[in-house]
Amino acid sequence: MSENQKSSLTFDLSVLNLDRLWEDSAAIALKALPAAMPDRPGLLPAFLSFMDAHRAKWFTTPASTRQSHHHAYRGGLFVHCCEVYNLMIALSQPLAAQPLLPPSYPTISISPASALLVAFLHDVHKLGDAAGHDYYEDNVSIKTGKVSDKIPFRTTEDYLKVSVVYHDQGPPNLPAEQAQFLINQGILADTPGGLQSLAYIHATAPALSAQLTEDEQFAIRHHDGAYGCSKYDLAGKETPLMIIAHAADSRGQSWE
């Protein structure tokens, strides 16, 4: 695959081609991630390996269950992540001269590599759990035998969603690596999506998990902002990467 000069992903939802979008995403990874390789030589192969291993899931997984929410169609999660990446890059561009701000006013800057990692990894728990259970399934009506138009998907009963109080050994049936990661984070109940995503990466792609910086993990963990935790857990600890990820994710949810 040749290196692509584009730094953003362009697509028309009316003629969406997931294969082309996939190739463009891989090309951007090949361009962005090597910049971080002096300190993280294993980052590029670990990320590409993770993405390739889940390609089929990316192409079939929606981002939500309801048409009134966002990207509730097969492949919607992948499209959403592409949009979040685009928005993170746009939001991190230097501000033009502002007459009401002093010349020395600091601008927010994040690396393209971090934007790529956070954008594509923030919701990977929706691909399933480490035991192989899907997160979503078709929402088939018992009465009609047809998939609902308004709510085409639902969370599967088999998905080991973490919403119980843990003991030292972790919740029953949860893959050990995933359970231990969550226990180590000190989260005992109602685990937010960002932390579930980190746990999934830790359990299924330890090489990639080891390459993520603390800042990237924090941004993935808190991409929902105060919606995903008590505001007191986050207040005063926000980072530029986390703020941009949250803004991009929120905007991307209404970008249809």
Image (spheres, grey):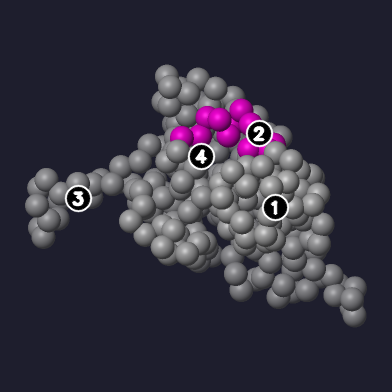
Kind of residue at badge 4: Leu
Seen in the picture, residue 167 relative to 156 is either above or below; the reply is: above
Range shown magenta: 202-213
Answer with mark 3 or mark 1, whichever residue precedes in sequence.
Answer: 3
Q: Name the mark nearer the viewer: 1 or 4.
A: 1
- Locate residue 247 relative to residue 41 in the image: left or right: left
Kind of residue at badge 2: Ala
**Residue at (41, 63) in percent of width and height:** 232
Answer with mark 4 or mark 3, whichever residue precedes in sequence.
Answer: 3
Question: How far apart are the alpha carbons under marks 2 and 1?
Answer: 25 Å
Classify 10 Å Cα crowding around label 2: few (below 14), some (14-19), many (20 and above): some
Classify 10 Å Cα crowding around label 1: few (below 14), some (14-19), many (20 and above): few
Badge count: 4
Quadrant where the image shows the C terminus: bottom right
In this rendered view, identify the residue nearer to me: 154 or 149.
154
Question: How far apart are the alpha carbons under marks 3 and 1?
Answer: 52 Å
Question: How far apart are the alpha carbons under marks 2 and 4?
Answer: 14 Å
For mark 4, what is the residue?
117
For mark 3, what is the residue?
96
For mark 1, what is the residue?
167
- Locate residue 237 relative to residue 135 in the image: left or right: left
Answer with mark 1 or mark 4, whichever residue precedes in sequence.
Answer: 4
Classify 10 Å Cα crowding around label 3: few (below 14), some (14-19), many (20 and above): few
